[in-house]
Image: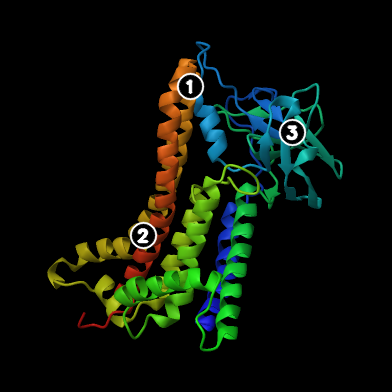
Amino acid sequence: MHKLLNFSALASLTVLLSTNAPLYAQGHEEHGHKGHEHIITVHEDVEVHGERFPETENEEGDYDPTPVIMHHIQDAHSFHIYGEGHEAVSVPLPVILWTEKGLVTFMSSEFHHDSHGHHVVEKKGMYFVNYHEDIFQLERPDETLTLDEEGHPTNTQPLDFSITKNVFTLFLACILLFLIFGTAARKYKNAGHKVPRGIASFVEPLVVYVRDDIAKANVGEKKHEKYMPYLLTLFFLIWVINLMGLIPFFPFSANLTGNIAFTMSLAVIAMFVVSFSGGKAYWKHIFFPKPWGVWPILMPIEFASNVIIKFFALMIRLFANITAGHIIVLSLISLVFIFQSVGMAAVAVPFALFISVLELLVAALQAYIFTLLVALFIGQAVADDHH
């Protein structure tokens, strides 16, 4: 058992390194100034210590919860603690940019508001602006962002490797997994013939459950062992991250599994694991399906289904379920401000509390479903021909 837990801790590091890259911001792009463009200043939003909070009123002057909800579920370069406007308190995170002049680093708290409405930081003779949590480079400090017809900035965007809320949460979750699995493994190693206590007694039933009801039941009695570290890592990583996203204060509160880049990374890793595990029978079924008469039709369908679609479904399922829970809770709380009535809190708060408690079940359920489906796909890939 202690060897299995140590392997799972190592697998956590592998998932960390593999899923980290897509969470970093977009690449360095030079946008051409083609078609109709217009110049705006960057002060449509309210600034809070480097964070940009959207306006909460629509054209009719009524409260609009959509910008606030979207702000809270998206990634950011700092953790907002409490307060509004210039009195707000936030925890800044490192901004790491790769530009034509090399590496540029600074804390997100250095973004400030000037007379031109920009969040401007000057480093190495370059100027950077934070626009809706995307960082763009300006030629001079008084320059304004240029937007295309769809409202997207056309300014240069440096390669962004910043430690955002989601990246920070990923590191924190992996550290917690190392501590949990490492401590449990040492407990087993030192217990001898005695029953382990403490964290090991909590981890053991979960590990046994994943082994017996997920790995053995779907991968098979003979072939499940080498996939156990990966399956354990999937289950615990997703579960821990889901729980961390339900805690509404620093250092938690990041909506990591509600980030499509993260769920896509997990799905891509699962696709590679299943593809490289597939035996001759598995690929024969995909590329040479029976009956032979409809092979030209079935082969593209089998390939798309087994190599692309089912992993795409994995990505969307986890992303949609976690994001939906956060949106529902925030929407219920927003009813108080939409109706501008304290009495509405008597309805909204109990429902929000109920959904929050339900989210505790969803956090574990989504970790179970994702791990179960991956184990099922692995079992299909390693199955013998007669199966």
In terms of secondary structure, where does tag 3 sit? loop
Distance between the alpha carbons at the discs numbered 1 and 3 = 27 Å
Count residues near mark 3 (Cα–Cα under 10 Å), then give few for <14, some for 14-19, many for 20+: many
| Residue 67 in view in this figure | yes
Find disc 2 in the rendering and name its residue: 369
Find disc 1 in the rendering and name its residue: 336
| Residue 159 position in % (x across, y down) | 68, 50
Find disc 3 in the rendering and name its residue: 49
Distance between the alpha carbons at the discs numbered 2 and 1 = 35 Å
147 relative to 298, above or below: above
Distance between the alpha carbons at the discs numbered 3 and 2 = 39 Å
Give, as a three-letter code, the residue at label 2: Ile
74 relative to 233, above or below: above
Which tag is nearer the camera, tag 2 or tag 1? 1
Which tag is nearer the camera, tag 1 or tag 3? 1
Residue plotted at (48% across, 49% down):
260
Give, as a three-letter code, the residue at label 1: Val
Who is closer to the viewer here, 86 or 277?
86
Earlier sequence position, callout 3 versus callout 2: 3
| Residue 75 position in % (x across, y down) | 59, 43
